[in-house]
Image (spheres, rainbow, N blue to C red):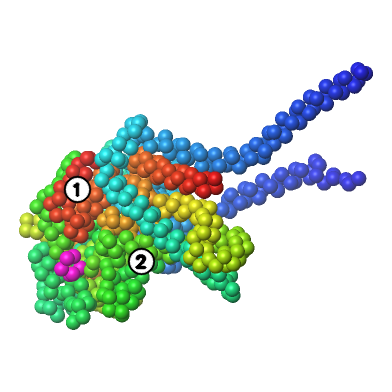
């Protein structure tokens, strides 16, 4: 072998080595700007928040902050009766709104999916509530729920049902918060399920027709199993949105009467910006984060089981 | 090849000189400007965005541009605290409620003693009500804010409704309850057309405290180390609200109302009486907002026997300079403008602002237009501010939550107050 050939071969070998390493690193290099941004806006605040939750810290007295370890968590779980009330309301609110949204969402998605004419127009109109800002929804429904001059009580009186103290009765106020939230969020569920329904092959329904399946059997055996992935994704998003509900409640009831409609999101806001208790607010938000993580993991496990 | 000789030598010199002129010109040409963070009602009390308003006149006279940022009470506190802590100097001048004035907030405000010392005789600092100035001093005695407005709770009532029922203005709580009962009008369908009383019991309200003080009670002891809500006065206060609420003399919705629906109910003749903050008087006698402006009256809040007449909760607003402001001198000029004798009188007469100067209440001009001023002054003198405890917002919320539970019959009055005492004492 000529000397030049030998060196060229080595040179090519080294070149190949470097080239393959660069090729290996390229995706990471290309991802790094996004990862840096995510790290700054998501990872750093989350980690810092967890760190803050271990301190007794008031915003207006940063100099007198004290490291207290898990004492904030101890106080939340064992010394704060409001927290358990708030947690109970948040979980109940989440469960009821999601249940209703899914029933209505599946129903409306099926109706739109089976429409021959005007499907796009109808679906677009149906989406309008979702495009309204939650604050506007809260303020509008607050007027609708007013006892003496709200539209809802006006119609209830008209049909002889009498008035309801929607905003001031602890039981009625629960529904006063649920109904606008369901009204606003159901279109989101419908949208996701419509996408899921659109992906189901027509041939399956044709085959089912040939076999003489009823509408219910078709839904049970074809439609529902095939929209489970879409359903799970919608469920996961909605659960996280409901757990951290804030703007609708704060404009509609402020968490009242008393603490009857006080969710964790509003409690965190109050603790941080009204009571100026940064450490305790950080603790509550870590607990909310953990709740979100637990639910997300459950849904992901459910999804992966279905895939298998 | 292009010749670029215009960029060399003389060209560069001319270019740089031009840039320096532009920058210097833009700096000198830039108007003097301050940013003020203020509550919308206080802004209205200065005349708002009217050309004749105090702020517009100040800008016209001094050439200082004033950027006004308005924000409701709770958001205002957040906004200014966030900017103070961030040391942004975003708001040169900010307003604060009297109940926020403690060392925790004072650390962010510019000390004003040297500014006050430089004011002339015409400003007459001593004319400002002494107790208001005192509450703006930090624990080391440094002045951190100047009072802008002071108000107390007054009993607002519809004169015509009281006269129709042959009732006198209530002076004690039994008369108050009796009047509420008689003034409530229910039609044959069982619909309440007129409520005897309207209050606002929205989650962060102060109405419980207003009545508590009028009954001789307190939230905390003098040293602010113990909660005193298990007193007889506190129990009486809760019983009064419970009875008014359960008997329908007060709308059920007061638990969801903030100030605006309460005032609207009085303006529309759907309510006969209400106890709330005195500076809102201007809205109730505003001919543009209500057809029954001439029917409105006010009196000191009813009190229990042995309690100074008119005692209730004082509330005030103060005006201060951010320590990190880059326009402190301009900010101080603005503060002088809003708190001098002339403008305090104008704001009191024209916009029903609660003046902070004794001379306003002694002015014949003011008394001629506002004969009820003496009642107001008497009530303010016998009333008290909320305890300036750094955690008072939390204390107030605990008290409100427990009392609301009692109103809704989720707890007895005693249990609610005992719970409140237990939880508040833990905080203290």
Residue lying farthest to the left in this orientation:
B305
Q: How many marks?
A: 2
| Distance between mark 1 and mark 2 Cα atoms | 29 Å
Q: Which corner quadrant of the image does residue B259 belong to?
A: bottom left
Q: Residue at x 57, y 42 (%)?
A: A37
- In the structure shown, which secondary structural element does the residue marked by tag 1 occupy? helix
- Determine if the magenta segment contains residue A251: no
Would residue B35 be visible to someone looking at this image?
no
Q: Quadrant of the N terminus of chain A?
A: top right
Residues at discs 1 and 2 both on one chain: no
Image x and y of residue A143, in percent: 36, 69
Image: magenta residue range: B245-250
- In the structure shown, which secondary structural element does the residue marked by tag 2 occupy? helix
Q: Residue at x 11, y 50 (%)?
A: B231
Mark 2 — residue? A142
Q: Are marks 1 and 2 in contact (CB under 8 Å)?
A: no
Image x and y of residue B303, in percent: 11, 60
Q: Residue at x 14, y 54 (%)?
A: B413
Question: Magenta-highlighted stretch: main secondary structure?
Answer: loop
Mark 1 — residue? B420
- Are there few (<14), some (14-19), or many (20+) residues within 10 Å of tag 1? many
- Are there few (<14), some (14-19), or many (20+) residues within 10 Å of tag 2? many
Front residue of A282 and B195: A282
Q: Is residue B292 left or right of residue A37?
A: left
Residue lying farthest to the front in this orientation:
A211
Residue lying farthest to the right in this orientation:
A2
- Chain designation of label 2: A
């Amino acid at each position: 072998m000529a000397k030049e050939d030998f060196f060229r071969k080595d040179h090519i070998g080294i070149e190949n080595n470097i080239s393959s390493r660069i090729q290996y690193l390229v995706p990471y290099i290309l991802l790094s700007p996004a990862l840096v941004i995510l790290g700054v806006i998501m990872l750093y605040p989350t980690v810092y928040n967890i760190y803050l939750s271990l301190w007794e810290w008031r915003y207006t007295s940063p100099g007198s902050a004290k490291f207290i370890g898990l004492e904030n968590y101890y106080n939340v779980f064992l010394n704060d009766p409001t927290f358990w009330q708030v947690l109970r309301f948040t979980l109940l609110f989440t469960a009821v709104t999601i249940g209703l949204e899914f029933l209505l969402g599946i129903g409306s998605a099926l109706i739109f999916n089976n429409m021959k004419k005007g499907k796009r127009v109808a679906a677009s109109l149906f989406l309008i509530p979702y495009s309204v800002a939650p604050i506007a929804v809260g303020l509008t429904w607050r007027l609708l729920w007013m006892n003496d001059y709200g539209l809802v009580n006006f119609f209830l009186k008209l049909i002889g049902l009498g008035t309801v103290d929607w905003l001031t009765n602890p039981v009625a106020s629960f529904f006063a918060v649920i109904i606008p939230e369901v009204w606003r969020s159901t279109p989101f569920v419908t949208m996701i399920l419509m996408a899921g329904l659109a992906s189901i092959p027509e041939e399956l329904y044709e085959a089912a027709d040939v076999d003489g399946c009823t509408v219910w059997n078709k839904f049970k055996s074809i439609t529902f199993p095939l929209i489970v992935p879409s359903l799970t994704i919608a469920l996961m998003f909605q659960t996280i949105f409901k757990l951290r509900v804030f703007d609708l409640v704060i404009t509609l009831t402020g968490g009242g009467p008393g603490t009857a409609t006080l969710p964790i999101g509003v409690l965190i806001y109050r603790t941080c910006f009204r009571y100026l208790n940064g450490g305790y607010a950080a603790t509550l938000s870590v607990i909310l984060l953990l709740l979100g993580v637990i639910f997300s993991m459950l849904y992901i496990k459910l999804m992966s089981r279905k895939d298998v | 090849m292009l010749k670029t000789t215009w960029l060399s030598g003389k060209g560069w010199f001319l270019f740089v000189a031009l840039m320096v002129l532009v920058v210097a010109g833009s700096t000198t040409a830039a108007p003097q400007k301050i940013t003020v963070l203020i509550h919308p009602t206080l802004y209205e009390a200065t005349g708002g965005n009217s050309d004749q308003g105090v702020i517009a006149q100040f800008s016209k006279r001094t050439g200082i541009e004033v950027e006004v940022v308005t924000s409701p009470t709770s958001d205002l506190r957040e906004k200014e605290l966030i900017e103070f802590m961030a040391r942004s100097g975003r708001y040169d001048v900010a307003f604060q409620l009297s109940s926020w004035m403690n060392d925790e907030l004072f650390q962010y405000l510019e000390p004003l003693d040297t500014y006050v010392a430089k004011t002339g005789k015409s400003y007459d600092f001593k004319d400002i009500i002494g107790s208001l100035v005192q509450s703006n001093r930090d624990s080391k005695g440094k002045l951190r804010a100047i009072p802008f407005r002071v108000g107390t709770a007054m009993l607002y009532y519809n004169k015509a409704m009281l006269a129709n029922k042959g009732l006198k203005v209530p002076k004690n709580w039994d008369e108050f309850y009796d009047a509420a009962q008689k003034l409530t009008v229910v039609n044959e369908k069982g619909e309440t057309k007129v409520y005897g009383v309207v209050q606002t019991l929205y989650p962060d309200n102060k109405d419980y405290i207003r009545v508590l003080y009028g009954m001789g009670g307190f939230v905390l002891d003098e040293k602010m180390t113990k909660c005193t809500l298990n007193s007889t006065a506190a129990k009486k206060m809760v019983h009064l609200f419970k009875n008014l609420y359960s008997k329908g003399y007060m709308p059920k919705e007061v638990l969801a109302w903030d100030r605006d629906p309460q005032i609207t109910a009085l303006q529309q003749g759907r309510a006969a009486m209400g106890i709330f903050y005195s500076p809102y008087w201007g809205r109730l006698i505003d001919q543009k907002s209500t057809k029954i402006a001439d029917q409105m009256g006010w009196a000191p809040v009813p009190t229990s026997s042995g309690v100074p007449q008119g005692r209730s909760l004082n509330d005030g607003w103060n005006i201060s300079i951010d320590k990190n402001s880059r326009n402190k001198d301009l900010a101080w000029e603005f503060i002088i403008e809003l708190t001098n004798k002339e403008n305090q009188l104008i704001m009191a007469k024209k916009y029903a602002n609660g003046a902070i100067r004794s001379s306003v209440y002694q002015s014949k001009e003011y008394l001629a237009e506002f004969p009820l001023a003496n009642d107001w002054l008497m009530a303010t003198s016998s009333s008290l501010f909320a305890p300036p405890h750094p955690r008072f917002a939390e204390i107030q919320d605990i008290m409100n939550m427990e009392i609301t539970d009692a109103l809704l019959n989720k707890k007895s009055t005693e249990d609610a107050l005992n719970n409140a005492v237990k939880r508040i004492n833990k905080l203290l």
